[in-house]
Image (spheres, rainbow, N blue to C red):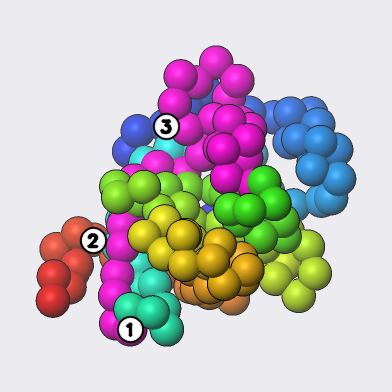
Amino acid sequence: MNITIVDGFAPTNEQAVAAFEQELGCRLPEDYRAFLLEHNGGQPELTVFDINSTLMPDDQSMIHYFFTLDPASEYYEIRDEIKVYTDETRMPPELLPIACDPGGNIICLGIRGEQRGKVYFWDHEFELEAEEMGDLYYNVSCCSPSFQAFVESLSPESELNYE
């Protein structure tokens, strides 16, 4: 996987990833699994991505950090993020929080069903509207068909569209 991490976490291993998958009750998509084994989260050098939102067309965001499996991490530990975001009223259960942007939005990975393998943007600004409508996907936009494609689409901050 071609991604440069400029600020990372302690390495992980196959045992830790397999244990995490057992906790989730599913195997992670192979491209994301490989990313965890190689990098275990961290801050990427290239950060900008297109949201592809129907709520905010042509909008972009930035990866602040990819979450880690490192239990000693004070911030950005994926299990902590799961506890915060994946209950029955906040985020669809098929989605796994894998990263955050600087504004508190979450980048997710589909781990079950037809969402499996796809990367999504969960917009906290529209969370209440989603709750009111009873639609956990109201504030969720598909950014990429796969984690690999998502990583390959990242661009430098100098290409961020401020419009």
Amino acid type shown at disc 1: Pro
In the rendered structure, which segment of residues is drawn in magenta?
57-86
- CB within 8 Å, label 2 to label 3: no
Q: Among all residues in the image, which is located at the extreme top?
A: 72
Residue nearer the viewer, 5 or 150: 150
Q: Which mark is residue 156?
A: 2
- CB within 8 Å, label 3 to label 1: no
Residue nearer the viewer, 131 or 18: 131
Q: Which residue is mark 3?
A: 8
Estimate the x, y position of residue 50 in percent, counting from the top left: 36, 73
Q: Residues within 10 Å of mark 1 (few under 14, many from 20)?
A: few
Estimate the x, y position of residue 87 in percent, counting from the top left: 67, 46
Question: Is 96 above or below relative to 161?
Answer: above
Upstream in sequence: badge 2 or badge 3: 3
Residue 141 belongs to magenta span: no
Instruction: Identify the residue at horizontal 74%, vertical 28% (top origin).
Output: 16
Amino acid type shown at disc 2: Pro
Amino acid type shown at disc 3: Gly
Instruction: Identify the residue at horizontal 76%, vertical 75% (top origin).
Output: 114
Residue 156 occupies quadrant: bottom left
Q: Which residue is mark 1?
A: 57
Measure the C-alpha gap from mark 3 to mark 1: 32 Å
Residue nearer the viewer, 60 or 41: 60
Upstream in sequence: badge 2 or badge 1: 1
Picture quarter with the C terminus = bottom left
Residue 69 occupies quadrant: top right
Residue 73 in sight here? yes
Instruction: Identify the residue at horizontal 86%, vertical 45% (top origin).
Output: 25
Upstream in sequence: badge 3 or badge 1: 3
